[in-house]
Amino acid sequence: MSQLLKISEAASIAMHALILLAEKQGELQSNSRIAEAFNISANHSSKVLQRLIKCGFAGAVRGPGGGYFLAVDPAEVSLLDVYIAVDGEPDVSACLFGRGKHCSLDVCLFSELISDTEALLQKHLGSVTLADYMDRDIGLPATGKSNDNDTDQQRFPGIQPGRKSRR
């Protein structure tokens, strides 16, 4: 069954990676460690991490023993900030066909539902920061190596927004 709500894989990787870096502050995390933690392609993870460096959310140390680190205060970065950095401003066209494409109906069947859902999602992502996920048991391995008891991909539990976005 397909999902009704979709966030791009790149935005999802960015959010997950930054939460991992926030939780592991003070420890450099290799690209392979990040990719392994979320069962994703190391190539895709590397591309997303480069974008996060360019946006100023992450930094990197090159060479043996190097890796990635969080370059911002986790309480100042909302998930909406991360989404926008990776995917740009959300499209609020409220049409399943997208901007510039029109169906033959005079009244869109889904425009109100889509608009309301988009607004709710933006409000939630804008009110949740990286810090809101810190110190929560989200299933990350305690060390740089995963063990056989860890699942390949963890879902973040629902949280209560605690801080406002810097947007």
Image (tube, rainbow, N blue to C red):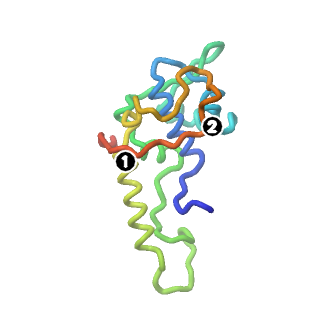
Give how far across and how far down residue 92 sits, in percent. 45, 63
Q: Residue furthest front?
A: 149
Mark 2 lies on a secondary structure that is loop
Crowding near the residue tagged with mark 2, few <14, some 14–19, many ≥20 C-alpha atoms within 10 Å: some
Q: Which mark is residue 126?
A: 1
Q: Which image quadrant for residue 76? A: top left
Give how far across and how far down residue 127 sits, in percent. 34, 46
For residue 135, side relative to residue 150 (left or right)? left
Q: Residue at x 46, y 18 (%)?
A: 26
Mark 1 lies on a secondary structure that is helix
Mark with earlier residue (2, 1): 1
Q: Which image quadrant for residue 150? A: top right
Q: Which image quadrant for residue 43? A: top right
Crowding near the residue tagged with mark 1, few <14, some 14–19, many ≥20 C-alpha atoms within 10 Å: many
Give the spatial CA distance, label 2 vs label 1: 28 Å
7 versus 166 height, above or below: below
Q: Residue at x 39, y 41 (%)?
A: 78
The residue under label 2 is 152
Give how far across and how far down residue 77 sits, in percent. 39, 37
Q: How many marks?
A: 2
